[in-house]
Amino acid sequence: QVELVESGGGLVQAGGSLRLSCAASRFTFSIMGWYRQAPGKQRELIADISRGGVTNYADSMKGRFTISRDNSKNSVYLQMNGLKPEDTAVYYCNGRASWGTEYWGQGTQVTVTV
């Protein structure tokens, strides 16, 4: 069974930083990415990264978020700096196989306080 396990979420003050990690088991994904879903809003893409390291960021996420990947660990990371209260959301790891099948992690809560 393919699993994506996120870690690193938590409570942080505005202006602070967090680093999210996601480890995939039993499968190496073509694309891995991070999404988030705030209360009452749709899930939105933050960024994704190919196995070769090509990154893709949502326009609104450029600048404060950095995605990276360690293929040897089947892991993807999201460095978040300058966090704002509006970044409060559940952050989800996503893995996409080359044929299109997607898998999701269980989500990790990030809460940014003023």
Image (spheres, helix red, strand yellow):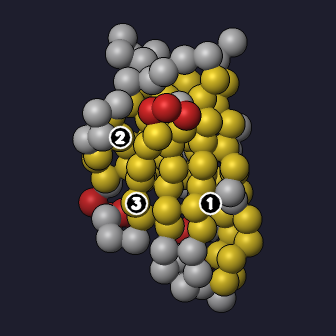
Distance from disc 3 to disc 2, alpha carbons, whole Å, reads: 10 Å
Query: Between residues 73 and 24, which one lies in front from this camera angle?
Result: 73
Give the residue type that dot 3 points to. Answer: Thr
Distance from disc 3 to disc 1, alpha carbons, whole Å, reads: 17 Å
Query: Between residues 55 and 109, which one lies in front from this camera angle?
Result: 55
Q: Nearer the viewer, mark 1 or mark 2?
A: 2
First along the sequence among labels 3 and 1 = 3
Q: Residue 99 is drawn in which quadrant? A: top left
Residue ID for mark 3: 66
Q: Which mark is residue 112?
A: none
- SS for tag 3? strand
Residue ID for mark 2: 49
- SS for tag 1? strand
Residue 61: percent from left, percent from top: 36, 63
Q: Using the rendered image of the protein, determine whether residue 57 is visible from the camera's viewpoint.
A: yes
* Category of crowding for the residue at label 1, using alpha-carbon neighbours closer than 10 angstroms: few (below 14), some (14–19), many (at least 20): many
- Identify the residue at horizontal 58%, vertical 61% (top origin): 19
- Identify the residue at horizontal 69%, vertical 59% (top origin): 9
Residue 4: percent from left, percent from top: 63, 31
Q: Is residue 27 left or right of residue 54?
A: right
- Identify the residue at horizontal 29%, vertical 46% (top origin): 55
Q: Quadrant of the N terminus?
A: top right
First along the sequence among labels 1 and 2 = 2
Q: Which mark is residue 89?
A: 1
Residue 101: percent from left, percent from top: 46, 16
| Vertical comparison of 97 with 12: above or below | above
Residue 64: percent from left, percent from top: 40, 71
